[in-house]
Structure formats: C-alpha cells, structure tokens
Amino acid sequence: MGATVHAAFFSRTGDPSVIQWGELPDPAPGPGQVRVRTLAVAVDAVDALVRSGRWSTPLTFPVAVGRDLVGVVDAIGPGVSGLREGDRVWTSSAGYAGRPGATAELVAVERDRVYAVPDAADPVAFVASLHPATTAVAALHLRAHLQPGETLVVVGANGAVGAALVQEGVASGADVVAVVRDARCVATLEEWGAEAVVADAGSAADAIADRRPDGIHVFIDTTGRADTASAVRRLAPRGRAIVLAGRTSAELDLWTLQVRELRVEGFILSALDASELREVANQVNARWAEGRPLTAHVGEVLGFADAAEAHRRMEAGDLPRTAGRFVGRLVLVPDAPSSDAPRTT
C-alpha cells in the first residue's frame, strides 16, 4: 500500500453514520492541480445534501466530505503557474462533481478553483465565512444584480447566510431590511447598517409593506418559511425574488409577474462554474482588502474525526448561537481521532 492520508470520508450515500474516519491514498497533484495541506474545513448544509444523496452529483468513492477548505499549498502539479509551495489558499468547490472532498490532511484541487487567503484572515474564522460570503456575493450580484439604493429584504438575517447577505447588501449601498424572529438580533443588524424588523417569516413581506410603500427590489428568504407569493406581490416593478431555500410551494400570479416584469429565480452556489466562482472569490477577498470582510460566527471547532457528529448536529439543527442569537458555524480541523469515531483502514 502506498502513502496515505487521514480523512473523514464516505463510500456510499446515506445518513451521517456512513462517514468513516480512516485513510485514503495520498493525492499527487495532476496537471493543472495543486495539493493543499488542509488547515480548516467548514461544515455546510450542502455537504449533507451530497453525502445523503439528496442532491445528485457525480461522486468518485470513497470521497472525503466537505466543500469549503483553507490550507497551504503543499505541492504543485504540471502546468500550474501563479502559486508557490507555502501559499495560503482557499476553495469552495471540493467534494462534488467528481472532485475530491475537503476533510482530508491533503487534498488535490484544480488550480482554477483555488484563491489566495487574505493576509489578515485566521484560517478557522475565514473558512467559517466562506459559504455565507460566497452565497451572498453570488446571489446578490450574479443573480439579483443588486444596485445601490435598491431595497433588499433578507429573511432569516440571524443565520450565517442571512447575516452575510445583510453585510454585503449594506456594503453595496443597498437599503437593507433584515427580518428576524428574535429581537435580540436587532442591535447587531442595526450596527451593520440595516433596518431590522421582528416578524413571522411567513408574513415578512407584508410586515414591511408600510415601511417601503414603493415596493421591494430584491427579496431573499434564507429560511424556506416565508410566503413567497406574498413577497412577489410586494415587489417593485422589475423586482427580483431569489429562492435560496426551496422548502415550500407557492402559487404565483403570472399576470402580475408579466406586466410588472418581475423575476423569481432559484439559486444554488454549487451550480456556479469556475469562472463565476473566481469572480465571486475576487469580490469576497476585495471586501477583506477594503476592511469590510463578510464575517460569520464560529460556533465550535471539532476534529476531522468528528465529522459524522458534526453532520448529525447540523442536520438536527443543534448549532451553537451567540448571545445575540446569531447561528454559529461548525468548523473541522486536523486533529487526533475521537475514540468513538467509525474507523476503517
């Protein structure tokens, strides 16, 4: 048997119990690839969709779990330029579409899918921010084409993605209305520059109608609980509703959609191609250069061997929260295996 690396991986789709802690072959970087020594991996909802098989994507088993990682370039494959061994890099597209996953000591990543880590960024805090930040930038700019001065409504602004949407909306010069169900979030949202509203998610659009009588330009629900049909009725002419959490159905008035030139569009980050991801990454890094990074709360840091437990907790909604009731993110780092981790050799 050749050289190996420790990894949290799965060989079939299923519930979190399919994740094993063991060894995979040491990944030599091929043409156009770099090998990254992993420093930190975020635990994302999309990781569970891939692992469970709910989201169909090509997988080469066994595959390590995880999509977002921060690490250090360890080796460089043929044809790669612009990077050196020791460079800190990040990627947000591991572990799906046939690519190796993130939760391994060493990961081979395509050169066009790795980006420089900002000098000031801590690996754990930065990797926790990647999914929220990239989702916010892509949804607001690649899909909604948010313009300065437009009204942006974010439902679920106390979640990681919702908070990033608020931060990016404010940084982009939008008039941001943040909808939450817990008043303890309001002070922080107002400090960020948003007008915060405490409302039931389902009635979010109606709850702010009198505050924005000219209508909503961009409406984004991160919870899957908002009344999308009501939101569409509250859109300004040429308004956009971006669907990030398609957990419910909605009956839309197509005549209103047509004559007011409204748009309802689904969005999933993992569908972006490499050039789109590069554009998003440049914007995420630019916010750091401006001193306005899109941050997320780190709820808890666990070892790679705790990946199955992290997935279980994420799917159960058992996530830590800050004093302001913002959702904390789970981050995995290379560590000694837990005594109860499923093992394989």
Image (tube, helix red, strand yellow):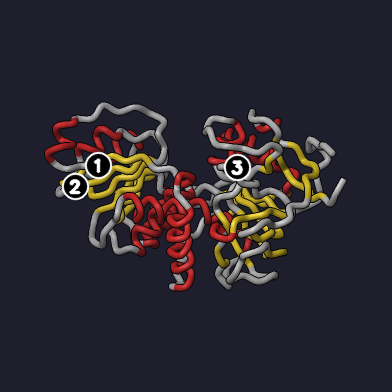
At horizontal 62% and vertical 65% (from top left) the residue drawn is 79
Q: Which amino acid, by three-letter code, is at mark 1?
A: Arg
Left or right of 74 on screen, residue 166: left
Q: Nearer the viewer, mark 2 or mark 3?
A: 3
CB under 8 Å between callouts 1 and 2? yes
The answer for how far apart the CA atoms under marks 2 and 3 are is 38 Å
Q: Which amino acid, by three-letter code, is at mark 2?
A: Arg
Name the residue tied to disc 1: 263
Give SS at disc 2: strand
Q: Which amino acid, by three-letter code, is at mark 3?
A: Gly
Name the residue tied to disc 2: 238
Left or right of 336 on screen, residue 69: left
Name the residue tied to disc 3: 98
At horizontal 23% and vertical 38% (from top left) the residue drawn is 232
Give SS at disc 3: loop
Q: Position of residue 189 (x, y in %)?
A: 39, 56
Neighbourhood count class around disc 3 (C-alpha, 10 Å): few under 14, some 14–19, many 20 upward: few
CB under 8 Å between callouts 2 and 3? no
